[in-house]
Image (tube, coloured by chain):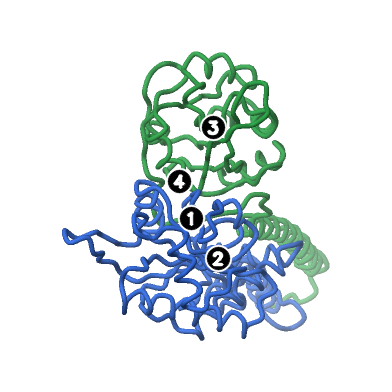
Chain colours: A blue, B green
Amino acid sequence: MGLSTHAQKPTRFGGGLPLSKYWLLLLALPVLGALAFAIFQPIQVLPRISLAPGFSFTDQHGARLTSDDLRGKLVYYTFMHTGCDANCAQTVQGLKVIQQAVDEAGSSVPVEFVAISFDPQRDTAERLRHFATEQGLDGEHWHLVTGDPVQLKNVIGAGFGAYYEQTDDGAFRFDPMYVLVDGWGIQRAFYRTPMPDPVRIVRDINFITKELENSEGLNRLAYEAAHLFLCYPD
Amino acid sequence: MTAPNTPTEPTVTATPEAARQTSIYSRILWISVGAILVLALAALLAWRLRPPELHGVLIQSPQEAADFTLMTSTGEPMSLSDFRGKFVLLYFGYTFCPDVCPTTLNDLKGMMEALGPKRAEDVQVIMVSVDPERDTVEQLSTYLPYFHPSFLGMTGKVEDIQPVASRLGIFFERHEGTSAAGYLVDHTAVVILVDDEGYVRMIFPYGTSGEDMAADLTYLMR
């Protein structure tokens, strides 16, 4: 009887859980760890959405600016033309809000601002330069560019997914939009709004700079895990 | 009536003891086997769930790569979607390129060798010409097999290649150089990996070794 009772008792480890449950727990640990990582998101990252389009445009100084020139830097893009009054001023104000937020965030990575004009006929280099001066955009980090109409459509429309259209009277219809592109040339965030939220801008810049600062060794694995488990902010 | 002290009694008391010992040994054996199995399974799970140690930059694009059709070095037009089921490595370069393109094509050759013949069957390297004026079908079909017999070239009109390149983050522009071959073409030098389902999955910066590209591909192909 005594022997039989002993045989039915599950083997215990240190007087705690039955041994078999320890094995189950051990087996479940990697799964539980992955689940906990996905649910509690100890590290958050911005998604790597898609490749930003490649281009070669002319800036407000008449110099060539290519997508390769901007590698290694964070870039905020927007799409505009100088011929419109209220909308364009608002777009530029939007970029200035971003610049102010970036300055406050004190990013360790250089941040550039590129405003692509979809009206190359009227927005010559001289006119873009005049517009930049008028709006108080400093020449070092601001690039007001334009180029060949077909390339513009490919880059703005197909590449960035921003809508613009020239109407019969020569005016333009467009949706204000800002895009954050990282140093690899990958689109990381879209802001489909006339006036971006500076708090969100600072947050997004911080996400990317932290990821860059932790791009070596074990830290990189943790950040890649965050991408793998879609630890993205709202 | 009762016989409490029968001669067989010592044997009766010894048998349960032996049985208990056998049972304990048997249990230890099974627990050990179970432990090894569970540990092996846990290690396998942890290995499968580990974050990748990648050399390229992983992209989790929700959209498939835009399809395109160009003339190949075999003389027939083909689309990117024709390679569905294979991992496609796209490189935008040109045959008169003095340094960057041959270096990258050599790295891609090294990648094919590192992958081994079986995995390499599921991989297609395509060089899309950024200099279609000089990169004819004949020129591409002579140049590319020098690196690897399976490498394909693609060419077409500049106006057809430009949007394809731009959508994939590639810029190219011709400029007059001092090269004996005439003009040069500035171009983005990354390698783009499109997976077997048609999604852009990774970019390899210029200088990524063949072994490193093969290691990343092996991870994605598992």
Label 3 sits on residue:
B123
Q: Which residue is mark 1?
A: A52
User: What amino acid does circle 4 point to?
Assistant: Ser
Q: Could you say whether the residue bearing mark 3 is in a helix, strand or loop? A: strand
Looking at the rendered structure, the secondary structure element under dot 1 is loop
Is B185 drawn above or below residue A183 in the view shown?
Answer: above
Q: Residues within 10 Å of mark 2 (few under 14, many from 20)?
A: many
Taking depth in this image into account, of B153 and B9 the one nearest to the observer is B153
Amino acid type of the residue tagged 1 in the rendering: Ala
Q: Are marks 3 and 2 on the same chain?
A: no
Residue at the (59%, 66%) spot, across then down: A74
The answer to whether the residue labelled 1 contacts the one labelled 2, judged by CB atoms less than 8 Å apart, is: yes
Residue at point 46%, 52% (across, down): A53
Which residue is at the front of the view, A176 or B137? A176
Q: Which residue is mark 4?
A: B166
Q: Residue at x 70, y 79 (%)?
A: A2
In this view, B36 is above or below B89: below
Q: Are marks 3 and 2 in contact (CB under 8 Å)?
A: no
Mark sitting on residue A75: 2
Quadrant in the picture for the N terminus of chain B: bottom right
Distance from the alpha carbon under mark 1 to that under mark 2? 11 Å
Q: Nearer the viewer, residue B40 or B108?
A: B108
Badge 4 or badge 3: first in the primary sequence = 3
Subunit that carries the residue with mark 4? B
Residue B104 appears in which quarter of the rendering? top right
Is B175 located above or below residue A143 in the figure? above
Residue A224 vs residue A184, the one in the foreground: A184
